Amino acid sequence: MTRNSDLLLTAVSPTIWGSTYLVTTQLLPAGYPLTVALLRALPAGLLLLAIVRQLPHGIWWARSFVLGALNFSIFWWMLFISAYRLPGGVAATVGAIQPLIVIVLARLLLGSPIRGLSIVAALAGIVGVALLILTPAAALDPLGIAAGLGGAVSMAAGTVLSRRWRPDVSPLTFTAWQLTSGGLLLLPFAMMMEPPLPFPTAANIFGFVYLGLIGAALTYMLWFRGLSRLEPSVVSPLGFLSPMTAVILGWAVLGQQLSPMQIFGIAVVLGSVWLSQRAQQAPAAGNSTLGDGRSVLSKR
């Protein structure tokens, strides 16, 4: 499969993640962030485990729980805290710093070079997300900002470590291990900190099934597959597609207004994603590389 095909398949994940806000607000009971995260991760993980019938072995027990915590437990927990304490635009803009964190962590953990064009693309993506959903009246809450940054660091670390730690198993199996581990870590906190869910309606059941099977199992299998084939600095900027999809769905499904500034933001997001891929395709063709502390210029 070609690199472009790998990119397109991986981009499906953040595009689907953009529907999470719509599904959560329209189909699920409000006020159960930990329980929703738990029911999104654990049933999907157990189902995938039943399909693959392969448990971790040796060091992979510990690594699965570390990755499950970073990619699911901590990330989703911080994400919900940020979403509850900050306006959606502020929360999404804070979370959009993740590709910059990935660039730094990939250098530290994988030895990947830091390319100037990649930093420009990441900054452009943050600006694009801000144009999409940040409003002038947005308030700032210190705890919400800290949670947003914590979630971005957690997901960035999980992204880089998922590339560094690649078990000799299929992406489906790798996803099953992490979803199950992340769900198990969420279980005691959800039970202690939140009341039981009310009796589910048909809409609730559909929402949970969608978030578990499509929004978690399918998307993270494609995400981890992409990380096994592509550098984290290539995969991470695709996350900018998530808030873009959320805004488009709000316009198409909920009848929300789409302003000229938001349309410009969509263009900036798409441009930043394209620029980030361009930066990785030609690393030696005159791009400045900061990974070894020098500016390296080379010819084709």
Image: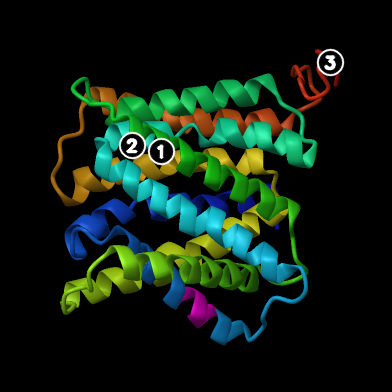
Residue in the image at 33% along x and 50% along y: 80
Q: Residue at x 63, y 86 (%)?
A: 53
Q: Give the quadrant of residue 140.
A: top left
The picture quadrant where one finds residue 196 is bottom left
Highlighted magenta segment, given as a residue range: 44-48
Q: Is 22 rendered above or below residue 37?
A: above
Give the mark count. 3
The answer to whether residue 177 is above or below residue 153 is: below
Q: Amino acid at mark 2?
A: Gly
Residue 87 is situated, as x and y percent measured from the top left of the image, at 24, 35
Q: Could you tell me if residue 121 is visible in this image?
A: yes
Image side of residue 296 versus residue 173, left or right = right
Residue under label 1: 148
Disc 1 to disc 2: CB gap under 8 Å: yes
SS at mark 1?
helix
Q: Position of residue 276 (x, y in %)?
A: 60, 31
Instruction: From the image, tell me which residue sits under label 2.
Output: 144
Quarter of the picture holding the N terminus: bottom right
Secondary structure at numbered mark 2: helix
